[in-house]
Image (tube, grey):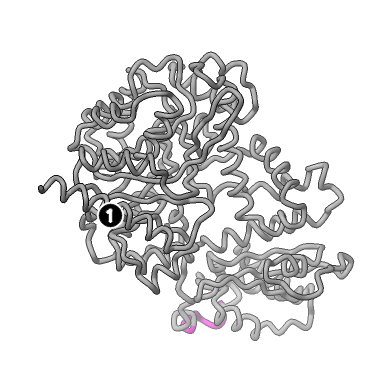
Amino acid sequence: MVAKPAQSGLGPGTIPAQAGIGLRASHYLEVLETRPPVGWLEVHSENYFGAGGKPLYYLERIRAHYPLSLHGVGLSIGSTDALNSRHLDQLKTLIRCFEPALVSEHLSWSSVGGRYLNDLLPLPYTEEALGYMVRRVSQVQDYLERQILIENVSSYLQYTESTIPEWEFIAALTERSGCGLLLDVNNIYVSACNHGFDPAVYLQAIPPAVVQEIHLAGFTVNRFEQGEILIDTHNQRVYPQVWALYRQAVRRFGLIPTLVEWDTDLPALEVLVDEARRADAIIGEECHVAAA
Amino acid sequence: MSRLRELQADFAQAVLNGVDTAFGHYIRVSGLGGERRLQVYRNNVFLSLTEALKAVYPVTQRLVGGDFFRYAAARYIPLYPSTSGNLHDFGGFLPEFLATFEPTAALTYLPDVARLEWAYHQVFHAAHHPPLDLAALAVAPAERHGELTFTLHPAARLLASAFPLLRIWQVNQADFAGEPTVDLTEGGIRLLLIRRENLEIELQPLPAGEFAFLQALAEQQDFATACERALAVQPATDLPALFSKHVQQGALVDFSL
């Protein structure tokens, strides 16, 4: 980045244990003008890697009013290529400029041999991959000089060579690398349906102390003669089954900042705010139960 | 090669190049077969990369139609794969690709339209830059003005085409409401794309002399050479007027001696 926006001056602060929404370009003006009542905002880091122009202009102004989380989709931490130093530099610059309270990436890979597929591809859950991910996450945290959160992804296949359940892999990764967990409840549900495991088992295996953020989103069902497959499309409201799983998660993990993601077929801003309100209602109800 | 690297290389090959036989043994079969499961990833990858191209090339897409654009994108993606985790970096070779893509060979203007759209995309994300420091320029010794070199604003691009590119671009904007036909024989155009202080992007058609002048400065030729080139193609060029215009409008932002 050549021209840096001024630092927000707010300091990173913390993300409140409330619902937030993803900020997308088509909502910039409305968010600035109406300041919707959501606890915080999250953006895809890469959308602000440009050197200037509208994205940085609006983010700078909106950041003055909301706590911020940077969510990366392209670092390709699980790739066996060397870490992309340009990408890391751009991320570090962005962190310095916008002072996000949380920075997250995915338990996935997206490139090999310099070719990027720009998708969140699953890793085999083996001892080799676990050791590798621990080293890579540590490298990234050392370079950025901060903790990052790693998010579990939706998957549509399981590898024959996987020997460790995903939930154990993630628990071990957080313990050995010191990263936090961005628990995507929708992704757990999607993968549970696609691979036939019990999502409650997944939640039980996650140490409560590592969960610092939760994601919710909508999925799409693709039906075939031999069966169906759920795709993590972020293009509609959160399904009732996922709200139910979210309630279980709040019961286990307590007050956790929760983000409603919506990336394609973007609806009116008020629909996102309404989804966030539903998440806040669940947080409120479960806290009330816990207190009583 | 590590086991993990081998898996990733085979996965990428199977997704991008459709060589799936090498990948089937990696996938656990349960309910749906391995090829169906891999197809989900293939769809996701091609869909998101195609969407990235559509976002940068809306006019190109409009000219060939959505279905054909998707077809062309599916050919482009494995030939010029993405090399960045940032999707905004993807698609810069589409003009070159279209120039040799047999099915669009008759649309001779198409590669230039794509060049304009890629330039527009770069200008959109380019760095901010303060205006030229006039006070500093004023103290440069007059006898050495010819040796000055200038820098174009990072959010400015020059583009020339043998086709009426601006007309093609204008009539294919979503909000265009005039006469939609373009006479391809009406002649070429020289354009300055520049992002203004309000972050809106302008497409300015330039006379030959003015374009040659800016083009020379963009190539780091000195001021005297830029003036010579402008006068060579258009003897009536009012050099002082156009120099002050581009300083004031912010196309020229820096100088050195």
User: Which three-letter amino acid code belongs to the residue tagged 1?
Assistant: Asp
Quadrant into which the N terminus of chain A falls? bottom left
Which of these two is toward me, B99 or B183? B183
Q: Is residue B92 above or below residue B130?
A: above
Which of these two is toward me, A228 or B144? A228
Which x, y percent locates residue B16? Answer: 61, 31
Inspect the magenta stretch and tell me whether residue B96 lies in it.
no
Label 1 element class: helix
**Going by the picture, which residue comes out furthest to the left?**
A292
Left or right of B60? Residue A57 is: left
Which of these two is toward me, B143 or A134? A134
Residue found 61% across the figure and 75% down from its top: B146
Kindly indicate the quadrant of the structure image that contains residue A199: top left
Kindly indicate the quadrant of the structure image that contains residue A67: bottom left
Residue found 31% across the figure and 52% down from its top: A279
Which x, y percent locates residue A200? Answer: 29, 30
Q: Is residue A221 above or below residue A3?
A: above
Location of mark 1 (residue): A280
Which of these two is toward me, B129 or B141? B129
Left or right of B51? Residue A98 is: left
The answer to whether residue B160 is seen in the rendering is: yes
Residue found 34% across the figure and 26% down from its top: A198
Which x, y percent locates residue A89? Answer: 38, 47
Query: Where does the magenta region start and end?
Result: B138-144
**Going by the picture, which residue comes out furthest to the right?**
B185
Residue found 50% across the figure and 70% down from its top: B256
- Chain bearing tag 1 is A
Kindly indicate the quadrant of the structure image that contains residue B136: bottom left
Which x, y percent locates residue B54? Answer: 63, 52
The answer to whether residue B225 is seen in the rendering is: no
